[in-house]
Image: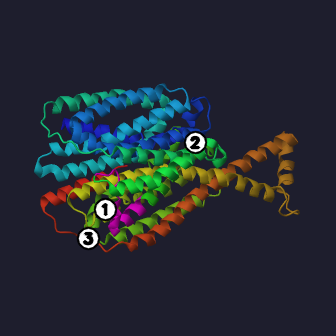
Amino acid sequence: MLLNIVLGLGNVVVLSNVPGYAVVVPSAAGDLQGVTPSFGVWAATDHMMGLALGFALARWLAARFGDYRVLTAAYVFYAAISFACGGSETIPSFVASRILLGLAGGVILPVGQSVLLGEYPESLRTFGVGLWGVLNAMPFMAGIYISGWYTEFLGWRDLLYLNIPVALLISGVVGSLLYGRGWRRRFPRADLVGFLLLAAILYGLQTIFNMGNDFDWFHSPILVVALIIALVALPCFIIWELGERHPVIDMRLFGQRNYAIATICSMAGFFVIMGSLAVFASQLQLILGYSPSLAGGVYLSLLLLSMPSAAIVHELCKRVDIRLICCLNFLGFAVTLTWLGLFDKTASFDQLAWPMTFFGFSFAMFFAPLANLAMHGLQGARLMRAAEEFALLRIVAGGFGIALQGVVLFRRTPYHALDLSDAFGGRRFAELDLMKQLTDKLEPLGFTPAMATSQVGRFLQQEAGLLSLNDVFLLGGVIFVGLSGVVWLARATHPPRLTAAQELKQLTAQELMEQI
């Protein structure tokens, strides 16, 4: 019972740090030498790349040093890096600390699951897998509100400092409960070359996506170097991994049609989900003037329909063709994102809560069907390997989504500002000069002509930001409509006949795929 409590708490802490930072970005950016929010986003995207690389390291570390030893050490490391994050005064030091925090979190999640399930008796392991699934879903939705509340009332640094006592407590309890447990030391070959090439590709691309808007893309020598590194490392990585017996990413898995289709849909879908949620969390504060806690409160609506849908989706996957479930869910995402993308004026809290409620329903239905589709036809060691890679690639896509959806917002804002200025100032239709009409009404209220023009300019800038945010949602809707067709390229699924041991292994792999 105690092990369940502490490892469940640890899972909540690690996962809450992934989406929860989205609502912290404006406050953190202002506190880190007053950089723009686009600089603050680096700490979110690079953190997710660290998580992905942590997943790649977890299996090797656990086999080499023992799972509970690696887990206790990872929590101590997590506490130390949380202290470094909270004490950072510049954006480079903060981003570097967030990368290391993600690396520790990426080790904690799969190893923690392995440790917990290893302590369950055979008869209760299915219950343990189900419990772990609940622990994966809750922090993602509630973490944004918790982070927003802490940021507003206690400060964003205290949110990171809170990780320290919790992580040390978990490390101490796990180490005490499992001290002296026997384990079989294995010496798997570490694909160090593949790992370094993967890291170069991920951080090369992520650096370009993060810094492109602010550093004028490839007019910056830094981004040119990052592009060269990524372009050289990518073919080298593919060739190396195809010839490696124990690769970091097993390319041969993509020879399985269902795994390839499920992975593509998972990556593209999570790209939209993470990008939309992260951009929305910050723009609620920057455009609409929400406080951090109120912006986080909007995301609590996700919980209303997500919990009942999460409870039934696994049973649906056993009885209905998974392609149909995925298709309908993708269309549900498209409808919800279009709903959010059609607001043409500032919306009240309750107006936003309704589409977010249905977004939560689709979000809860997103992970399990795709995990089942990816596992179809895989067994044994390949199944667990596929689960690790599936989760790793989805995390990478989420990090790219946060940065690239920010690019859409950045590029569309001046377009809409210019378009509105042309229409409002009479340059599009000379007989329709709304600017003159509005300033004439403001001047009797005490506004000088300069003040009136400035106020109108602020209104237009806010509306341009809102319309560009709409474009982010509408683009996501288009992507999900496309995915609703792509998923039918997979082979039809049918419930396999499994032994109890095979079913447990499949459930374990599925929960690993559903993390983050």
Residue assigned mark 1: 313
Q: Amino acid at mark 1?
A: Val
What residue is shown with label 3?
319
Q: Is residue 500 above or below residue 168?
A: below
Mark 2–mark 3 contact, CB under 8 Å? no
Of circles 1 and 2, which is in front?
1
Q: Which residues are magenta?
A: 246-266
In the displayed structure, would residue 51 be above or below residue 387?
above
Instruction: Report the residue marked by disc 2.
Output: 290
Residue 131 rendering spot, x and y as whole percentages = 24, 48
**Mark 2 element type:** loop
Marks 2 and 3, Cα distance to the nearest angstrom?
43 Å
Mark closest to the chain's N terminus, 1 or 2? 2
Q: Nearer the viewer, residue 327 or 181?
A: 181
Q: Residue at x 44, y 31 (%)?
A: 159
Q: Is residue 264 magenta?
A: yes
